[in-house]
Image (spheres, rainbow, N blue to C red):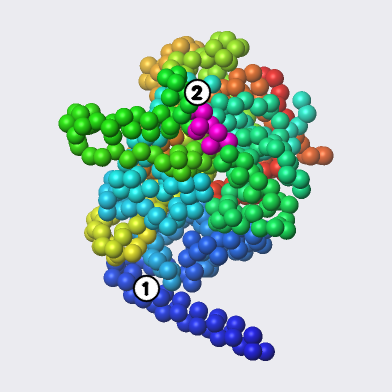
Amino acid sequence: MAALLLAAAFLAIWCIYNGYCLLLNYHRASQLKIPIVCVPISPDNPIWIALQTSFSSVFKYVPFNYFSVTRYCRLGWEFHDRYKTHQRLGDAWILVTPDKNWFHTSHAEAACDIFSRSQEFGRPVWMSDALKVFGPNVATAEGSDWQRQRKLTAAPFMNKRAASDGSKNTSEDIRTLALHVLAYVGFQKSYPFSSVAKTTGVRQPSTYRDSLSIILQNVLVVLVLPSIAFQIPFLLTKWRQIGWAITDFREYMLEQLTEEKRLIAEGKPGSGTLMSNLVRASEVQQEVAGMGRSERAYMDGKSHEMKLLSVDEILGNVFVFNFAGHDTTAISLAYSVLLLVAHPEVQEWIGEELDFYLETDKSETWRYEIVFPRLKRCLAVLLETLRLYNPLPGVPKYTGRQSRVLQVRNQEVIIPPNTLVVANLMALQTHPRYWGQDSLTWRPSRWILGSEKEVRGDLSNRFDNETLLKPEKGTFIAWSEGARSCPGKKFAQVEFVAAMAALFQKHRVEPVSKAGETLAAARKRVLNVVKDSNVELLLQMRDPDSVSVRWIPR
């Protein structure tokens, strides 16, 4: 009885405190003279996020409407809402929670302003601290430390060469494909295309691919819990497997780091992998650090001490590039393939381009500098998929300890300190004002502008004069904007276009119909599976394996 009373008292105190904080934040928000929405819990509350993830099958039945708190408390509500709240409340409104207030805007010019003023609208660093699984990295660094790491980690992502039964696990197969690309780029390791190792109760030697795969499959708990938590005796088999994968992956990285340092010491070229570039960048900076002040000033135009990448920073960056590069690319590929299953006319559309430009059957002869710029329709599939199904539905910024002034159309808004500021990506990328009345329709052809000089039947004229649409600045921010935009943008585009070319040059894909189901009905079912998506850590389909597809020669 005493325990129940204590729990009730604690709950009452918690409710009173949260109510008090909510009132304070509401008072601050009311000074802005913009629409206000109040919710009793912040959508980024870690306990609330864990509950949503654990009980996602239950939350799918909770009504999502304009007035229920379930609309704005749910993680990733922006994906479900799109532009609707902005259409109802205007280009700027504020979400009041007991923790912090969230200022949202769907005005393109204001969005550009936010991203361009990185010193005033900084990152909420506490949201990325979880990415320090193996060490500090470019995603968790700030200020001059971020500038140093961004400079040292940029090299691997410059323009360089990259190397008929129904399929039941299309999403899993695509994850494996993306994993193999990263395995080669990161560690120059190739594997047969088969499923990764399954969880067992016995400690077994694992490959680099398998250890990374296990980490990425369980990345939410890996980010939330410290590594030591997976070493506790008598854990469930799955959790022990995660701990073994973390240990194995760290050992692989350390082995590769040692080997790259040995090659450098012997004056030999490195492997050209991500690890090689990071180690070599650090070695180059070591040489610069040993120069005199005038020599350093001559090299980079300013005199300052150069700090090397530490071992932990190298390991941390290898992990964060694998995490960011794998999951986002795998998700985008999975959405694109199933959307193409549902839209056979788009398959034919990109097939025309592939037939025209890829005259050889041997994919190893495809040269990046020649082929990639030509396959604009394939790239348009990625851009349109990211417009509607971006893996990361928002990029929040933070005012810090000072008020910030932001112009939203004709209104000057003074945003208070300690406020999260969000250029609402999903609203900007779907608002009819910028994308037309069919803004919620997946239509890759919207990205291709034809030539007025097009001659019917003249394929050379038609394809060579097609150009990619350049959206109004601030209306498409799939890779973020400003100084901290995604460094892997071009890498992701090249990887995606190469995958499209390899998959669709000689094949088409269609759904496997259920008993008594027409092909048209099967395609509609696939589209419904795509739309039934939710955000856990990133956007993903709730049940992609409920559909099977088959690949057929064209």
Magenta stretch contains residue 354: no
Magenta residues span 252-260
Vertical order, 321 against 50 (above or below):
above
**Is residue 324 or residue 96 the one in the foreground?**
324
Query: Which callout, 1 or 2, points at the residue further toward the start of the chain?
Result: 1
Q: Quadrant of residue 370?
A: top left
Secondary structure beneath disc 2? Answer: loop
Magenta stretch contains residue 254: yes
Give the x, y percent position of residue 229: 61, 57
**Residue located 57% across and 22% down the image:** 501
Which numbered marker is on residue 26? 1
Q: Quadrant of residue 194?
A: top right
Dot 2 amino acid type: Ser
Dot 1 amino acid type: Tyr
**Is residue 426 or residue 392 the one in the foreground?**
392
User: Mark 1 or 2, which is nearer the eye?
Assistant: 2
Q: In the rendered structure, are the residues bearing label 1 and label 2 in contact, judged by CB atoms less than 8 Å apart?
A: no
Q: Quadrant of residue 285?
A: top left
Give the x, y percent position of residue 252: 58, 36
